[in-house]
Image (spheres, rainbow, N blue to C red):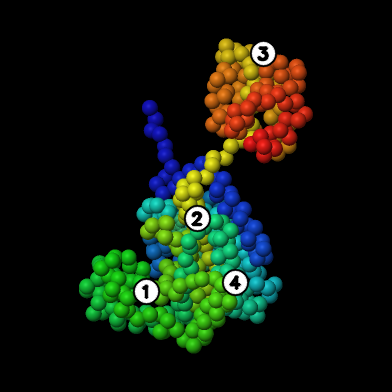
Amino acid sequence: MSQTLKAVRGTRDLLPPETALWNRIEATAREVFARYNFGEIRTPVFEDTLLFARGVGEETDIVSKEMYTWEDRARAQSEKAQSLTLRPENTAGVVRAYIEHKLSETGQLQKLYYIGPQFRRERPQKGRYRQFSQIGAEVIGPQTAGSESPLRDAEVLEMLATLLDELGIKGWTLELNSVGSAADRARYNEALRAALVPLAPQMCEDCQRRAVTNPLRVLDCKVPEDQPLIETLPRIADSLDEDSTRHFAAVTAALDAAGVPYTRNHRLVRGLDYYTRTTFEFTHGGLGAQNALLGGGRYDGLSEMLGGPRAPGIGFAMGEDRLVLTLLAQQDQNSAPPQLADAYIAPLGDPKDAAALGAANAKINAAALSLARELRQKNLKIELGEGSFRLKKSFEAADKTARHIVILGEDELQSGILTVKTFATGIQTKVPRAELAAFLSTPASK
Ligand code: HAM
C-alpha cells in the first residue's frame, strides 16, 4: 500500500462550516476598509530574499530562523539565479510595490489593504502556524500628504477598534507604546545593555544571551521568575526625544477624544526592525500564549531602507487564524445553530433501480434537478437527494441538512402539488409548485 500523505506540519485544511466564518471575517474587513477609503493591494506570495533581509531585518527571528528560502536556478538565458523567499509578512512587499510603481509621485497618501497567506517556520502550536493568513493595511505617503501625522496613527487604531467590534470580538485590549526614532532606540539599547550587566546572570538562559546580542528582546521574556527583574529595567519612554514624546502624546490624546480605550505597555517593542515611534498590539485573553490578535506600528524609515523616497507609514496585520479561534470560542458559549439549507428535495424513485441507473430514476432525478435549479435561482439554499434512496434515508439526510423536505414522486410531477414537511413543527403541507419558493422562504415555515 502506498503511504498516505498529510498536510505538512504547521499547515492545515480549512473546511466548511468554518470557512463560512473566514469569508464573513474577510467580507466585514473589506466593508470597513472601504468606509475608511482603503483600496486593495495584492503582492506576490514570494519575493527576493533581500527584501526581507533589508526590510524586516537580518537579526530578527523571522529573517534569521523562520523564512522559507530557496535558491531559484536560472532556467533560461534571460533569467538570473536568485534567492527567493515565501513572504513571512506583507509590509515589506507593500513598500516595495509603493517604490516600484512610483506611487509617491501621486503626492497622495496611499491607503492599501491586503488579505492573504504568510509563511513562517515557527514551532506550531494553538494560534501559531507555518502558513497563516493576515488581514492587514498600510498608510504610506510623502510627509506633505500628512503621512507622519499622529492623526494617522489614531485613525488606524480607531478603525481597528471599529473592525474588531463589528466582527463581534469581545474583550480585546489595545496595548500601545512608542519605540521612538532609530537614534532613541540605539540610546535605549545601550541603557538596557548596561542595566542588564548585573541582572542577566540571575535570568533565564535566553535572557543571558539576549542581554549581549539584542537587549531589546529581553522585554519579550515570558519566564515568570524573570518578570520582577525585567520590571526594574529602564523604560524606552525615558529614552525618547522630544519629537517622539510629543508625537505619542498626540496619538493618545486623539484616542482619548475618540473614546478608544488603550493601555500603555512599556515592554511592547515588537520583533521587526522597521518600527519607529508608535507600536501596538490588540490582544485577547482567550488565545492563551499566542495572545496577539494583531500587531503593527509606524515605519518612517522603511521606504529609504528599501531604496525608495522618504515615505513615512503606519500599518498593522491581523492574524486571521486567531480571529477565527476567538470567534469560534465565543460561539461555543452561545452555541451557534448549524447552518441549514432551506429545503432538501427528495426524488422518489425506485430503490432497486440504483445499480442499474435505470430510466425511472433518471427521469425523477432530472425533474428534481430542474426543481432545484428553479428554487436556487430564487435564492433558496437547496440540497438535492437521489432517486434510489428509500424514503426513510431521504428523511434522515434531510433532517440533518435542511429545514424542510420536499417530496417529488411521479404523483407530484403529474399534479404539480408537492408534499413538504417542516421539521421544526413536524407539519406536512401540500404546496402547489408555483407557491413553493414563497412557502419555503416565509419565516412562519422556518
Ligand atoms: P506581526 O506581529 O509579525 O506583524 O504579525 C501580525 C499578526 O499576525 C500577529 O499579531 C498574529 O496575529 C499573526 N501571526 C503572526 N505569526 C503568526 C503565526 N505563525 N501563526 C498565526 N498567526 C500569526 C507583522 O507581520 C507586520 N507586518 C504588521 C505590520 C503591518 N506592521 C506595520 N504594518
Pointer 2 and pointer 1: residues touching (CB < 8 Å)?
A: no
User: Residue 120, percent across and down?
Assistant: 43, 56
Under circle 3, the secondary element is: helix
Q: Name the kind of residue labelled 1 in the image.
A: Leu
Q: How many marks?
A: 4
Which structural element holds mark 4? Answer: helix
Judging by the rendered image, the residue that carries numbered circle 1 is: 216
In the image, residue 126 above or below residue 233? above
| Badge nearest the viewer, 1 or 3 | 3
- Could you tell me how far apart the alpha carbons at marks 2 and 1 are, in whole angstroms? 28 Å
At 49% from the left and 84% from the top, the residue drawn is 245
- Residue at 48% in and 68% down: 174
- Residue 34 at x, y percent in the picture: 66, 61
Classed neighbour count for the residue bearing mark 3: other residues with Cα under 10 Å, few (<14), some (14–19), many (≥20): few
Q: Earlier in the sequence, mark 4 or mark 2?
A: 4
The residue indicated by pointer 2 is 323
Q: Amino acid at mark 4?
A: Glu
Q: Earlier in the sequence, mark 2 or mark 1?
A: 1
